[in-house]
Image: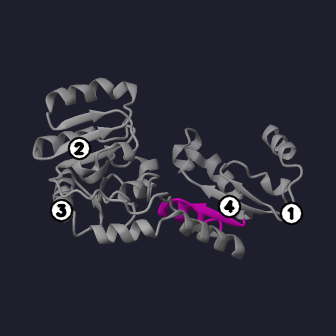
Amino acid sequence: IYESNQISRSLFNLSDNDIVVNFNYDYYFLRNLFPNNKIITVINDDFIAQARFFKGKHVQKSLEKLCSFSDAVLTVSYPLLKQASQWTDKAFLFLPWTKTGYEPSKSNTNRNALLLWAHIDKRVDLDLLVYILENLKNYEIHIVGPITHNLNEKIQLLNLKYKNLLLFPSASLDKLNMDHYFCSIIPYKSKVADIEAVTASNKTFQLMSRGLPLVTFGMPYFLEHKAIFKAESYQDFCEKLDISYHEFSSLQKDIEELVMLNQPFQRYSQLVDIISKG
């Protein structure tokens, strides 16, 4: 009731031609507030999997109500698209994008490093990183980003033990020397529900815009592409790394095409098309 009243007071002068874009899974009261407006709902996470109580049944009921009256439902992954399609025939896949074009490093220097550009938390598979460090000593792993407090000591000990593990503070891609890298890795633990629901992370096309192929783990529904390698075991992950290393140059054309298909203009055009048909 409080949220409904707040929204009513904030948007009291909304015209019927205005479009309401909603990111909240539990705002199933919106149709009562905006009976004549188009409502676009964005499902950008697996809210059911994240629910702590009643196996997410209360979240599922909210989502079902919300999707049933929304004029369009934008989902950010294949699993979420399948989920929403249970309740509406107006669900669409709406992936992230990159603001930059294809801007790879022009250097032909010997690239021998893997870029892990992420927030390191309990979902990251540290055992996989150790496996890589021990079995592919000709490669370096560069971790760029914050490390959650309860993993910091463990990561620092790994840094002392393995010379091919380097740690760097958070930095934008513009601040990194991309000449070092022949791929970026996304190494999550298997069977983590909210990770398995990902088809393309917010960083996917940013990384690929720098010419980097991706090697993933624990992400079975990640985007299918020639320059995206989804590993099914630790050994398979290492083999995919070797492929990325040896085929780095030949993958560039495919990477460029994918990046240019995922620019802001493409998402804007998709959104306009969805709204016009809603």
Query: Which residue does the numbered mark 3 point to in the structure image?
Result: 243
Task: Name the residue at 40% across, 46% down.
Answer: 192
- Asked if 163 appears above or below 175 in the picture, the reply is above
Q: Earlier in the sequence, mark 1 or mark 2?
A: 1
Q: Is residue 147 left or right of residue 202?
A: left
Q: Nearer the viewer, residue 71 or 87?
A: 71
Q: Is residue 226 visible?
A: no
Q: Earlier in the sequence, mark 4 or mark 3?
A: 4
Label 3 and label 2: CA atoms lie apart by 18 Å
- Which range of residues does the magenta coloring cover? 71-89
Name the element at disc 1.
Answer: loop
Q: Is residue 131 left or right of residue 67?
A: left
Residue flagged by tag 3: what amino acid is it? Ile
Query: Which residue does the numbered mark 4 point to in the structure image?
Result: 67
Task: Name the residue at 72% across, 67% down.
Answer: 71
Q: How far across and how far down the image is residue 233, in percent?
A: 22, 54
Query: Which residue does the numbered mark 2 point to in the structure image?
Result: 128
Name the element at disc 4.
Answer: helix
Q: Nearer the viewer, residue 274 or 170?
A: 170
Asked which colour scheme the image uses, the reply is: one colour
Name the element at disc 2.
Answer: helix
Q: Earlier in the sequence, mark 1 or mark 3?
A: 1
The local crowd at label 4, few if under 14, some if 14 to 19, many if 20 or more residues have their Cα within 10 Å, is many
